[in-house]
Image: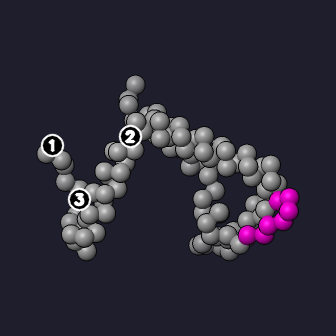
Amino acid sequence: MNAIWPVRAALARSRAIQKRDVFAHSYIESFSDSVNFVSRTTGGTYKATKHEFTQSSFEKHILEMVKVSMQFYDALGASRYDLQTFAEAALSLNRKSKTSTGKPSTSKS
């Protein structure tokens, strides 16, 4: 089996359940026993949608997001050090250049 498939499957599961854009770009109504996120389309025909969560359903959603995110992390097989090194390399490019050099180059290590 291709080694990338478990990573792709885990990422697909994560993306399928996450409401990141809804959580990040919505109007929020919170009550003592529930929370609602009201989101709108960003292009095309205007449409507003209310995403209603009870305290219990919101907690379940967050726990499911954590679970599938950890499955993705495990499938990726990268250590915290690997991810930190990658992030530092990406950030170092900010200091070197303000424009893209084009297509990525391959590593010679």
Specify which label sits upstream in the sequence, 3 or 2: 2
**Mark 1 Cα-neighbour bin, 10 Å: few <14, some 14–19, many ≥20:** few
Residue 79 bears which disc, if any? 2
The quadrant of the image that shows the C terminus is: top left
The quadrant of the image that shows the N terminus is: top left
- Residue type at mark 3 is Lys
Label 3, label 2: how far apart the Cα atoms are: 26 Å
Residue 60, magenta (yes or no): no
Specify which label sits upstream in the sequence, 2 or 1: 2
- Residue type at mark 2 is Ser
Classify 23 as above or below 67: below
Of 56 and 20, which appears nearest the observer?
Answer: 56
**Image depth: mark 2 or mark 1 in front:** 2
**Image depth: mark 3 or mark 2 in front:** 2
Which residues make up the magenta segment?
A: 28-34
Specify which label sits upstream in the sequence, 1 or 3: 3
Of 25 and 43, which appears nearest the observer?
Answer: 25
Residue 109 bears which disc, if any? 1
- Residue type at mark 1 is Ser
Classify 13 as above or below 85: above
The image shows residue 38 at horizontal and vertical percentages of 73, 68
Q: How many marks?
A: 3
Secondary structure at numbered mark 2:
loop
Residue at 25% across, 74% down: 98
Residue at 25% across, 65% down: 93
Residue 103 bears which disc, if any? 3
Position of 19 with respect to 98 (left or right) is right
Classify 57 as above or below 96: above
